[in-house]
Amino acid sequence: MIDRIHHIAVVVKSIDVALEFYRDVMGLTVTDDRVMDDQGVRGVLLAMGENEIELIEPVREDTGVARYLANKGETLHHICFRTHDIDAELARLNAQGVEMIDTTSRNGLAGRIAFIHPKSMHGVLVEIAQPPVGAHESSAKGFDHLAVLVGDYAAARETWKRTLGLEVVREIEVPARQQGIAQVPAGQCMVELIYGTAPESPIAQRIEQNGEGMSPMVAIEVKDIDAEIARYRAAGYTMPDAATGPLPVSVTSTISADQTHGLGIQLIQFGRAS
């Protein structure tokens, strides 16, 4: 059974440089820092409530991560879900005929891991992990939501239910943006399946050009967005003033991905109008 998001992973050119933002400015705590020679990468995990952000840096040029970085630049690489029995999950997925990168589990930074092929998840590279005893654990809220852009919402909704056992609990229409948002809970975080409600909508056009997949951002709930914006601006980061967000009674502001080594950081405050 999958019960929460374990981490989202960002591939970066230099972990040491990226830590100047994620550790020193955001204030996240490093929970693991290792070079995995068999994979040709250095990986660092940083705790954020019940979730973590993983930074991945290739240490060899002949690896898939190195090619990914060369082709796409610093950006979101994958999303990882936690399970307490990875072998049972893999047996279920293999029995369903889900296309896998790993049909058996192997050692990784997050514990025993396996990857589902993006073709099976509408362009999203999904990792499943069974963390080791003593790994980071928290009941505090971490991520508020992540965004996945989907062209065929009905098919994507069924895929997330069948493959990961995660179901849509709420559907929101945003007429002003010609888009729909379907919320899929994974722990305290929502995975939002975002789709266009008209062929000419910006989301539909973006998917037409770039395909389905994860949007390189994570949303974090804050109590005082103006204070947080001021804090990041004081640290030298450019952010717009808080403005009405697509979710009901919310305001948001975002530190763009080009300032944060490939992962846009959206701050969101609920219960307030702009």
Image: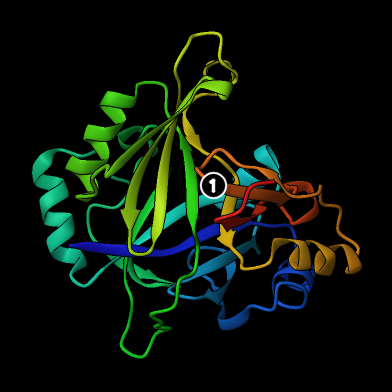
**What color scheme is it?**
rainbow
Residue placed most toward the observer, 231 or 216: 231
Q: Position of residue 130 (x, y in %)?
A: 29, 72
* Outermost residue toward the bottom in this view: 134
Residue placed most toward the observer, 196 or 113: 196
Name the image quarter holding the N terminus. Answer: bottom left
Query: Is 171 left or right of 262, judged from the image as shown?
Result: left
Compared with 158, 125 (above or below) is below
Residue 97, located in which quarter of the rendered image? top left
Seen at 31% across and 31% down, the residue is 156
Q: Position of residue 31 (x, y in %)?
A: 54, 83
What amino acid does circle 1 point to? Val
Seen at 34% across and 25% down, the residue is 153
Compared with 131, 189 (above or below) is above
Q: Does the rendering let one see residue 63?
A: no
Seen at 49% across and 9% down, the residue is 199
Q: Position of residue 92 (x, y in %)?
A: 11, 52
Query: Is 214 left or right of 137, judged from the image as shown?
Result: right
Q: Position of residue 90 (x, y in %)?
A: 18, 56
**Residue assigned mark 1:** 249
Query: Is 1 left or right of 122, judged from the image as shown?
Result: left
Seen at 79% across and 61% down, the residue is 229
Residue placed most toward the observer, 230 or 138: 230
Query: Is 62 left or right of 142, judged from the image as shown?
Result: right
Label 1 sits on a secondary structure element that is: loop
Q: Does the rendering let one see residue 192?
A: yes
Crowding at label 1, few (<14), some or many (≥20) Cα neighbours within 10 Å? few
Q: What count of labels does the image hold?
A: 1
